[in-house]
């Protein structure tokens, strides 16, 4: 019995430390002008106890006056409701690729699993953040297929992150051929045309794009960027550098910065 007590005590202390860290980062994001804060975990599918802990974190961030977003993997209906009841505003769950390319890249879950999670999130009344990755070896036609799949979700996602593959040593795609940056621009333009009401977010891999290409992305229809130190395991450009670029482009900024995301005003 004492051993069990000590174990629970350690778990409680761990949760408290995580809670303090998230709240500290939330305060820092708010001071930087943020209105939304994103929390992520690399789970395939969280257990109920994991969701309970995240729900506490969501409530803590909401107490700071920030909108909340989370990406935790596949969810069951009751887990989506738990997050909704905690005050979660957005849930991110990407399709990653077109259906006909998906099986060549991902083997840990089915495409239908992803669609099912998105359905659970929508039914719980949480806003959907859903996009994909460019540069995994797919064809241009398959990139168009990804955009079509996203646009045909009912309704279309509230925000659409467009990620460029970040090649990380030791991963299966570490030696993948770099994608032409203009392909990212094309995907953003297609997303803007097919999903006119969605936020099209220039996301992971942005650090590898020079300012000229990023400017083209904005002109093509991107009206949001991830803003902050890290996007899961990959770095983002410096926040002040982002603001200087947007100022040079005369793009007005609305305060929607999460983990942060920064949205240009329409």
Image (cartoon, helix red, strand yellow):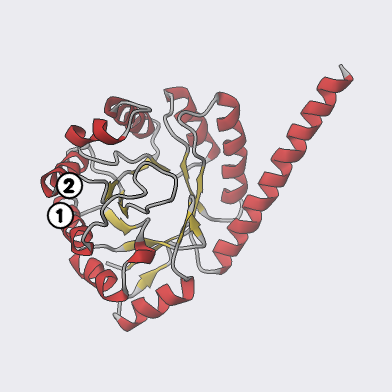
Q: In this view, does 48 lie to the left or right of 72?
A: right
Vertical placement of 109 versus 235: above or below? above
Is label 1 in a helix, a strand or a loop?
Answer: helix
Residue at the image point whose x is 70% and y is 39% from the top: 15
Task: Give the Cα separation between the discs numbered 1 and 2.
Answer: 10 Å
Q: In which quarter of the image is residue 97?
A: top left
218 vs 159, nearest the viewer: 218
Question: x%, y% of residue 181?
Answer: 23, 63
Q: In which quarter of the image is the N terminus?
A: top right
Q: How crowded is mark 2: few (under 14 residues within 10 Å), some or many (20 or more)?
A: many
Q: Quadrant of residue 157?
A: top left
Question: x%, y% of residue 50?
Answer: 58, 31
Residue at the image point whose x is 37% and y is 41% from the top: 172
Pointer 1: what residue? 190
Looking at the image, can residue 66 be seen? yes
Instruction: Point out the tag, 1 or 2, that comes first from the N-terminus.
Output: 2
256 vs 240, nearest the viewer: 240
Vertical placement of 2 versus 115: above or below? above
Question: x%, y% of residue 205?
Answer: 36, 58
Residue at the bottom extreme of this rendering? 248
Q: Is residue 74 left or right of residue 55?
A: left
186 vs 247, nearest the viewer: 186
Question: x%, y% of residue 87?
Answer: 51, 41
Of circles 1 and 2, which is in front? 2
Is label 2 in a helix, a strand or a loop?
Answer: helix
Vertical placement of 130 versus 257: above or below? above
Number of callouts: 2
Residue at the image point whose x is 32% and y is 29% from the top: 119
Pointer 2: what residue? 143
């Amino acid at each position: 019995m004492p051993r069990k007590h000590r174990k629970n005590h350690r778990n409680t202390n761990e949760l408290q430390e995580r809670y303090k860290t998230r709240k500290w980062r939330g305060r820092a994001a708010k001071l930087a002008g943020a209105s939304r804060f994103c929390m992520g975990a690399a789970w395939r599918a969280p257990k109920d106890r994991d969701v309970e802990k995240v729900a506490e974190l969501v409530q803590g961030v909401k107490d700071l006056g920030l909108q909340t977003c989370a990406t935790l993997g596949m969810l069951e209906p009751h887990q989506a409701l738990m997050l909704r009841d905690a005050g979660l505003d957005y849930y991110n769950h990407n399709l990653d690729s077109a259906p006909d390319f998906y099986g060549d890249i991902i083997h840990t879950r089915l495409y239908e699993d992803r669609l099912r999670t998105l359905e659970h999130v929508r039914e719980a009344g949480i806003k959907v953040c859903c996009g994909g990755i460019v540069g995994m070896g797919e064809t241009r036609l398959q990139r168009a297929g990804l955009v079509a799949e996203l646009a045909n979700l009912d309704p279309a996602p509230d925000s659409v992150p467009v990620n460029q593959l970040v090649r990380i040593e030791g991963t299966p795609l570490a030696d993948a051929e770099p994608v032409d940056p203009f392909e990212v621009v094309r995907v953003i333009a297609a997303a803007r045309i097919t999903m006119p009401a969605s936020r099209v977010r220039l996301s992971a891999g942005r650090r590898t794009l020079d300012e000229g290409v990023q400017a083209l992305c904005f002109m093509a229809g991107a009206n949001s960027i991830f803003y902050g130190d890290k996007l899961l395991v990959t770095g983002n450009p410096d926040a002040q550098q982002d603001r200087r670029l947007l100022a040079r482009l005369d793009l007005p900024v609305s305060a929607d910065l999460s983990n942060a995301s920064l949205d240009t005003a329409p």
